[in-house]
Image (cartoon, helix red, strand yellow):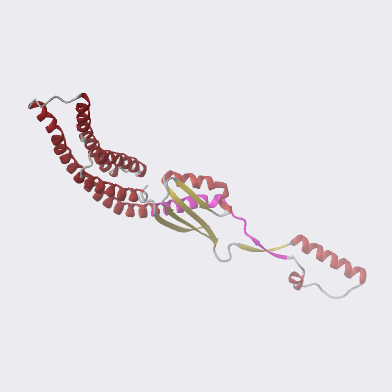
Amino acid sequence: MKSMTGYGEASSQIRGTRVTVQVRSLNHRHLDLQLRAPREYLSFEEEIRKVIRHKISRGRLDVFISRSPAKGQGRRLALDEDLLGEYLTTVRQAKKKYQLSGDLNVSLLYRVPDLLQVREVEVNAAAEREGVFKILDHALTQLERSREREGRQLKLDMQSQIRQLKRISILLESRASEIGSRLQKPVLTAKDRDISPRTDRESSEATNWVLKGDINEEVVRLKSHVEALSGVLAEKTPVGKKVDFILQEVQRELNTISSKVPHLSVVQLVLEGKERVEKIREQTQNIE
């Protein structure tokens, strides 16, 4: 079992560039992936998304990928040789035509506008691609370990609540047997003692009350659902949606039991059961 909250980070040097991947996950009913990557990686951004979806099935996922070239690696000083050639040609022609004196020197390089330019180094994204996916895989692994650690704590708490539900189911089973005997006894006694025969309406009402008070089927289903919860928690695949569905069934059986037998002892057990269900449901919002 894995929690939906966690954090993972990995960083490495790729061809003189530091690439860092940070992944943060939060609770969400479905997979909500928010990816922020450098524009240089736009060509394989969809592949990055596929890798993430393959490993994470549920939760809000914020993925940040950044790249920072090493000092002096990101920019280059470039000389516009064509522009320099035009300047030199024009100056020589002017000297000859107007008989000017003086020599040209390197001071021209920084005096002439736009002759020297600082340019960004062109990024070879294809050469960084393999390294980026390795860093991403490492970050996702760190995230999974974080989610598993928290998932183990959530599982222990949910198992504790399920044990209480089992106890409540057993007590309800005992109450069902006692109440069933009490409901049927007056009807049988009246028949055995040949008391004045009931009218059809009276007999129908008595029968309906006995049937309404019979909660054996509901208790059997309740115990079955609680056992199913225990089994689901042992699965290796994401179980959040399965647990949520089974909890709905448990809630339905508890509601039916309390409506059929509004006895104080039964109602108290049902209320405690609902409280346990709600606690499990709260934890279910946090698991994948």
Report the front residue among 209 and 147: 209
Q: Main secondary structure of the magenta part?
A: helix
Q: Is residue 167 visible?
A: no
Total of numbered circles in the picture? 0
Name the residue: 8% across, 26% down.
Answer: 192
Give, as a single range, the part of the protein colored magenta: 116-142
Residue 149 on the magenta span: no
- The spot of residue 131 in percent (x, y) is 49, 52
Q: Residue at x 16, y 26 (%)?
A: 198
x and y, in percent, of residue 130 in the image? 49, 50
Q: Out of 159 and 256, give the one closest to the viewer.
A: 256
Residue at 84% across, 75% down: 102
Location of residue 244 in the rendering, given as x and y in whole percent from the top left corner:
34, 43
Determine whether 198 is above or below 51 in the image: above
Task: Tell me if residue 153 comes above or below residue 51 in the rendering.
Answer: below
Which quarter of the picture shows residue 78?
A: bottom right
Where does residue 176 sit, x and y in percent of width and height? Answer: 17, 38
Image quadrant in which you'd find residue 184: top left
Q: Is residue 131 left or right of residue 189?
A: right
Residue at the (63%, 60%) spot, across then down: 120
